[in-house]
Image (cartoon, grey):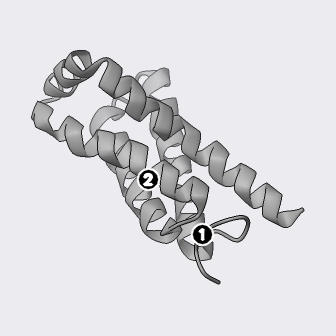
Amino acid sequence: MTKIFDLIARILISILFLLNGIFKINNYEGTVGWMESFGLPGILIIPAIILEIVGPILIIIGYQTRIAAASLSLFCIATAIIFHNDFSDQMQLTAFFKNIALAGGFLFLVVNGAKGYCLDKK
């Protein structure tokens, strides 16, 4: 039962990023414009999309889990700091802490790896 719960947990923590990567492709121009409104070059959307699609897939299948989780953890922390730093806005504060919480979940995977159904060798 532990293996199946591990797999479910990896799917649950990853699905948000996988879907957001796909949404960014579907709304590429809008996302570039939104990033540029924060003073970031729109070209940064390309590595973000790659990370948000490849990272979750690797975590779900359990291949190179620690590397993918470390990358997504750093991504979450950067996203929280760059995009959700208006703490006078309750929604931004909540988004900030959700990103920090996700970073913590990914750090748990960095420390423990994938224990359930996965491609990583034990």
Residue pushed farthest front?
119
Q: Quadrant of the C terminus?
A: bottom right
Residue 12, position as x, y percentages in the image: 66, 43
**Which one is nearer the viewer's eye here, 38 or 7?**
7
Q: What is the three-letter code of the residue carrying label 2?
A: Gly
Other-residue count near label 2 (Cα within 10 Å), few / some / many at <14 / 14–19 / ≥20 = many
Please state which of the two labelled residues, at mark 2 or mark 1, is closer to the viewer. Answer: 1
**Which one is nearer the viewer's eye here, 80 or 109?**
109
Residue 99, position as x, y percentages in the image: 48, 43
Horizontal side, residue 39 vs residue 9: left or right: left
| Tag 2 and tag 1, C-beta contact below 8 Å | no
Determine the residue positioned at 32% across, 48% down.
78
The quadrant where residue 20 appears: top left
Residue 11, position as x, y percentages in the image: 64, 47
Horizontal side, residue 54 vs residue 58: left or right: left
Residue 106 shows in this picture? yes
Horizontal side, residue 48 vs residue 72: left or right: left
Determine the residue positioned at 48% across, 38% down.
18
Residue pushed farthest right?
1
**Which one is nearer the viewer's eye here, 93 or 71?**
71
Q: Quadrant of the N terminus?
A: bottom right
Residue 121, position as x, y percentages in the image: 60, 81
- Label 2, on which residue? 55
Secondary element type, mark 1: loop
- Label 1, on which residue? 119
Determine the residue positioned at 27% across, 39% down.
82
Which sits earlier in the primary sequence, circle 2 or circle 1?
A: 2
Secondary element type, mark 2: helix
Considering only vertical position in the picture, is 111 above or below 76? Answer: below
Q: What is the three-letter code of the residue carrying label 1?
A: Leu
